[in-house]
Image (cartoon, rainbow, N blue to C red):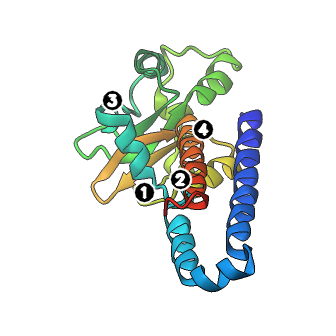
Amino acid sequence: MAKMQGGLKQILSHGSVLKSAVLRHVQLGSGWRQLMFVRQETTSTARIEEHGFESTKISDILKGKGKGADGSWLWCTTDDTVYDAVKSMTHHNVGALVVVKSGENKSIAGIITERDYLRKIIVQGRSSKSTKVGDIMTEENKLITVTPETKVLKAMQLMTDNRIRHIPVIDQTGMIGMVSIGDVVRAVVCEHREELKRLNAFIQGGY
């Protein structure tokens, strides 16, 4: 994970440097161009800034994930066994499940991840079939979440700073999905490529 985060920081750093350099080159061009097209360039530059990867939101990632992001299988209850929770993760090829309280309310109680399983079950020699999810989960007061409107770069910063790989997505109705570090990396890399295409089109007069 450290390598992935380091690589992602490098991508963003290089992307920002490249973007700044290209925009500076265009804005500082030759004197005659600066005089004749200064208003057009200023407007075009603003459009590039507006459509950059800094504007990508978590909702864009959820749309890209499709129906599988609706949260229908992303949870388990505090009373479920760790064995059943891990089996669900394996079946759905995910690394974490949001934990909800048992009963009709089903409010969020925390999150259980592969890391919880390894550290609190395997390493400690406990039985996953007799241990409840509520006994090993990361509790709600320590749970880090984002909303659909959260910027992808902000989510990435939260994940990096807190050394986590999964963040539940919450809106006013409750949980609507889960975003992983892999989702964030793919979104940033994809937008980074699109950013370079936009800059190239700008230089070639496409804007």
User: What distance separates the C-alpha of mark 4 from that of mark 2?
Assistant: 14 Å
Q: What residue sits right under mark 2 in the picture?
A: 152
The structure residue drawn at horizontal position 47% and vertical position 29%, both measured from the top left corner, is 133
Numbered disc 4: secondary structure: loop
Disc with the residue nearer the chain's start (4 vs 3): 3
Q: What residue sits right under mark 1 in the picture?
A: 147
Type of amino acid under label 1: Thr
Contact, mark 1 vs mark 3 (Cβ under 8 Å): no
User: What distance separates the C-alpha of mark 2 from that of mark 3?
Assistant: 23 Å
Q: In what quadrant of the picture does the N terminus appear? A: top right
The structure residue drawn at horizontal position 53% and vertical position 43%, both measured from the top left corner, is 187
Numbered disc 1: secondary structure: loop
Q: What residue sits right under mark 3 in the picture?
A: 73
Contact, mark 1 vs mark 2 (Cβ under 8 Å): no
The structure residue drawn at horizontal position 48% and vertical position 22%, both measured from the top left corner, is 82
Contact, mark 4 vs mark 3 (Cβ under 8 Å): no
- Comparing 99 with 66, the one in front is 66
Type of amino acid under label 2: Val
User: What distance separates the C-alpha of mark 1 from that of mark 2?
Assistant: 10 Å
Mark in front: 2 vs 3: 2
Image location (x, y in percent) of residue 118: 65, 22
Disc with the residue nearer the chain's start (1 vs 3): 3
Numbered disc 3: secondary structure: loop
Image location (x, y in percent) of residue 119: 68, 26
Disc with the residue nearer the chain's start (2 vs 3): 3
- Comparing 135 with 163, the one in front is 163
